[in-house]
Image (cartoon, helix red, strand yellow):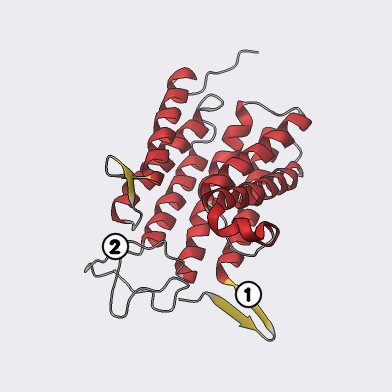
Amino acid sequence: MLPELDIGPITLQTFGICFALAFLAAGWVVSKRLRELGHPPDWSYEIIFSGLLGGLVGARVDYLIQNWDDVSDDLFGSIFSGTGLVWLGGMIGGAIGVCLWAWRRGYLRRELLDVCSVPLALGYAIGRVGCQLSGDGDYGEPSDLPWAMGYPDGTVPTPPGVEVHPTPVYEMLAMGGVALLLWRLRNRYDPGVLFAIYLVLAGVERLLVEIIRRNDSVIAGLTLPQLISLVMIAFGAGLIARWGGLRTRRTQQN
């Protein structure tokens, strides 16, 4: 594990480095896709900044809501603390930020959803590299598989001698594969369908990996991420059906 990098007097968090790399990679993909579609590639910087700003605000607000009893005594300090970010809030906040940008640019349409689908999958995969390096507790249950490993030096260490499922590695490989698949399919379907496919695949991935994760169940033996995943799968399948299914993109007549 390598939670921190010491470069002279500077200490860098490896999760933060991967967080930044995820946004840089997402920006590069967005720029490339916008250029293919005939839009200004510089929009990519605006999209990524809007998503980053909205995501940070949403992740912080979600954390404060979920931990109100712990943070209410020092709300101002908790708001500007360097820790405490929740993925779901970040996703919602980031989506709101991008939608506000798109409304201002007159680009609030289904094509934007497709533009964002590959970067979302790729950014998630790179983010899980940060989870693996920092050992932040996203690992799975104890396992005796040959590739099981311990996180004794992680920010949330495993007990001495205990090896677990390296679920960040599983998710990195799975979502990296999803990103590659979506990129190959980017011109095949009608607008919006690619994003719907992303919702289904990302939902299935998280639904399955949660089986060996350490999260507690909340309803019917399912964890909160699994419940969210079911919603993503159902919503994505509904969008696919509504927007023409998985038929090949219609050829436009001149």
Q: Is residue 191 left or right of residue 219?
A: right
Give, as a three-letter code, the residue at label 2.
Glu
| Image-quadrant location for residue 161 | bottom left
Q: Residue furthest front?
A: 73
Q: Which residue is mark 2?
A: 141
Up-down relation of residue 156 to residue 28 (above or below): below
Q: Is residue 123 visible?
A: yes
Q: Can residue 247 be seen in this snapshot?
A: no
Residues 144 and 85: in front is 85
Q: In the drawing, what numbered circle is on residue 222?
A: none
Name the residue located 56 percent from the left edge and 46 percent from the top edge.
Answer: 89
- Which quarter of the image is occupied by the N terminus? bottom left
SS at badge 2: loop
User: Residue 230: x percent and y percent?
Assistant: 38, 36
Instruction: Say the numbered circle drawn on residue 12.
Output: 1
- State left or right for residue 133 relative to residue 226: right
Label 1 and label 2: CA atoms lie apart by 28 Å
Q: Please identify the quadrant where the C terminus is shown.
A: top right
Up the image or down, 234 lies above or below 46; here it is above
Q: Residue at x 56, y 77 (%)?
A: 4
> Residue 158 at what x, y percent from top left?
36, 73
Q: Is residue 201 above or below residue 147?
A: above
Q: Quadrant of residue 33?
A: top right
Rendered view: 83 above or below 253 = below
Position in image of residue 96 (x %, y %) = 65, 37
Q: Residues within 10 Å of mark 2 (few under 14, many from 20)?
A: some
Looking at this rendering, what residue extends furthest in the left direction? 144
Q: Horizontal and vertical percent for residue 173?
A: 41, 56
Amino acid carrying mark 1 in the image = Leu
Q: Nearer the viewer, residue 111 or 167?
A: 167
Question: For the residue labelled by badge 1, is the local secondary structure a helix, a strand or a loop?
Answer: strand
